[in-house]
């Protein structure tokens, strides 16, 4: 790579470029323009994000904001972490030992306590209103720092997720239902002649659609065909699969869908995919919470800690943002549902874990009262969280994107970055 310094071109190593990029993040965009660093060059930094999505909404009081010894705390005990004074729930001993690398927000203030609406809110930073569909953060990252000419998708989701909204198919999530396996409609063994005939037939059908007034839809179809053809021929497909992963790696992550999904996520990020989401359901614990929590939490504790360990060992942690969260929290008050109690939906306060790219470790932001019912220090709105995610990823949160009708819409509408956890 070469940088233009005062009219003279000077070669810069990859390491040197990354150091300059870090400095630029501190000094602002003027520094970038002065040294001639373009947005395209920044994309080559290979910054990435892995979202560990806990579908169903985990209990904050039984994960990262425990209240042992109180009526609302239930049977969950707290354990010490690697950072003196910070304790988390007993179900996360491995994450506890990595607290120096992790920040926790305990004062997330949501507004949606229904699963679909909460999922949309925590994926897009917007509430589900009207007919306009906003893009998920994964699609925003794919749009802003993804390479449109990349052989692999710029947004991969292992499990279902929120769509790309008005940004369209170009940055839509490529959904993999089972980690280590490609979707059934993506095959690398289709004979070339058979593939050519299929594409010719599709082109003929699209020609009829276009004549009927569906030109925009045809353009999207053509883009999908090109991407699918390129993907099928890409050597990067091996990043989706686990055949070449060592048995020790598979065991380290845990032979569960989440564990293997996080191993695939690591491979995809290594291959250059800027955003990967891995979904782990089973957190809607209205009943049997203390029977179900140990297994669900152990799955996350094992896979998440191994992911962060691997990213550090590979020199990728400082440029890979790791997020672990669900759509809202659970009621501080324990219910009496048979056959055993649990917690119901609660959006007033919940917890989120962040680590990696641009995030300070060993930090806790916000505080709830002794019963876990009220935020008593530093409430963090969803917009604040998304401002923080954008800052971490080098995305301009104030940039305007345009809806299909041409309406300008900022990536994040309001809020301020949580400065306490930003390096």
Image (tube, grey):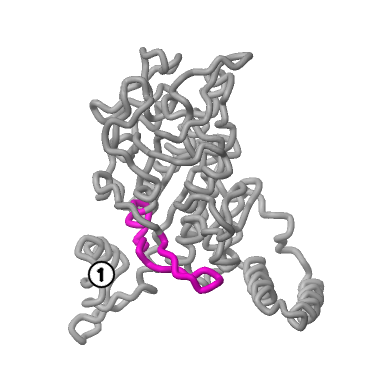
Instruction: Identify which residue is drawn at 37% across, 65% down.
Output: 45
The magenta stretch spans residue 401 = yes
Give the x, y percent position of residue 237. Answer: 61, 60
Q: Residues within 10 Å of mark 1 (few under 14, many from 20)?
A: few
Instruction: Identify which residue is drawn at 47% across, 52% down.
Output: 126
Count the marks.
Answer: 1
Left or right, 211 with reference to 399: right
Q: Quadrant of residue 374?
A: top left
Left or right, 316 with reference to 162: left
Q: Is residue 55 above or below residue 294?
A: below
Q: Nearer the viewer, residue 295 or 408?
A: 408
Left or right, 12 with reference to 146: left
Instruction: Specify the quadrant that holds the N terminus.
Output: bottom left
Q: Quadrant of residue 219?
A: bottom right
Q: Nearer the viewer, residue 301 or 412?
A: 412
Give the x, y percent position of residue 353. Answer: 39, 39
The magenta stretch spans residue 193 = no
Q: What segment carries the magenta color?
A: 387-411
Q: Which residue is mark 1?
A: 29
Left or right, 42 with reference to 256: left
Q: Residue furthest bottom?
A: 7
Using the rendered image of the protein, determine whether residue 60 is visible from the camera's viewpoint.
yes
């Amino acid at each position: 790579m070469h940088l233009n310094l005062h009219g003279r071109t000077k070669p810069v190593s990859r390491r040197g470029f990354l150091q300059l990029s870090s400095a630029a993040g501190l000094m602002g965009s003027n520094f970038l323009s002065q040294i001639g660093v373009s947005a395209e060059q920044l994309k080559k930094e290979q910054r990435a994000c892995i979202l560990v999505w806990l579908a169903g909404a985990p209990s904050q009081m039984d994960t990262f904001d425990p209240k042992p010894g109180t009526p609302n705390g239930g049977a969950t005990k707290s354990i010490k972490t690697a950072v003196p004074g910070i304790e988390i729930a007993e179900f996360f001993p491995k994450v506890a030992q990595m607290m120096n690398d992790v920040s926790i927000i305990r004062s997330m203030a949501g507004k949606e306590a229904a699963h679909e609406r909460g999922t949309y809110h925590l994926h897009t930073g917007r509430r589900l209103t009207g007919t306009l569909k906003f893009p998920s953060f994964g699609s925003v990252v794919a749009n802003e720092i993804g390479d449109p000419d990349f052989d692999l998708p710029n947004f991969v989701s292992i499990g279902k997720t929120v769509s790309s909204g008005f940004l369209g198919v170009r940055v839509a999530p490529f959904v993999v239902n089972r980690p280590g396996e490609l979707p059934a409609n993506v095959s690398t063994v289709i004979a070339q002649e058979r593939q050519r005939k299929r594409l010719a037939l599709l082109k003929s059908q699209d020609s009829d659609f276009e004549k009927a007034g569906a030109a925009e839809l045809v353009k999207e179809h053509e883009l999908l065909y090109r991407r699918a053809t390129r993907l099928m021929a890409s050597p990067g497909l091996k990043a989706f699969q686990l055949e070449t992963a060592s048995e020790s790696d598979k065991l380290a992550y845990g032979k569960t869908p989440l564990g293997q999904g996080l191993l695939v996520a690591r491979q995809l990020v290594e291959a250059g995919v800027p955003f990967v989401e891995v979904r782990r359901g089973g957190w809607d614990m209205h009943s049997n919470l203390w029977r179900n929590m140990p297994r669900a939490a152990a799955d996350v504790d094992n896979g998440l800690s191994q992911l962060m360990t691997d990213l550090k060992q590979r020199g990728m942690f400082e440029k890979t943002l790791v997020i672990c969260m669900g759509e809202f929290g659970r009621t501080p008050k324990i219910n009496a549902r048979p056959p055993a109690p649990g917690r119901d939906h609660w959006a007033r306060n919940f917890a989120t874990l962040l680590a990696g790219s641009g995030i300070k470790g060993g930090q806790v932001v916000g505080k709830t009262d002794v019963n876990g019912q009220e935020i008593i220090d530093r409430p963090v709105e969803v917009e604040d969280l998304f401002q923080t995610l954008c800052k971490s990823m080098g995305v301009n949160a104030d940039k305007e994107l345009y809806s299909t009708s041409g309406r300008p819409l900022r990536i994040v509408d309001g809020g301020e970055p949580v400065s306490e956890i930003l390096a």
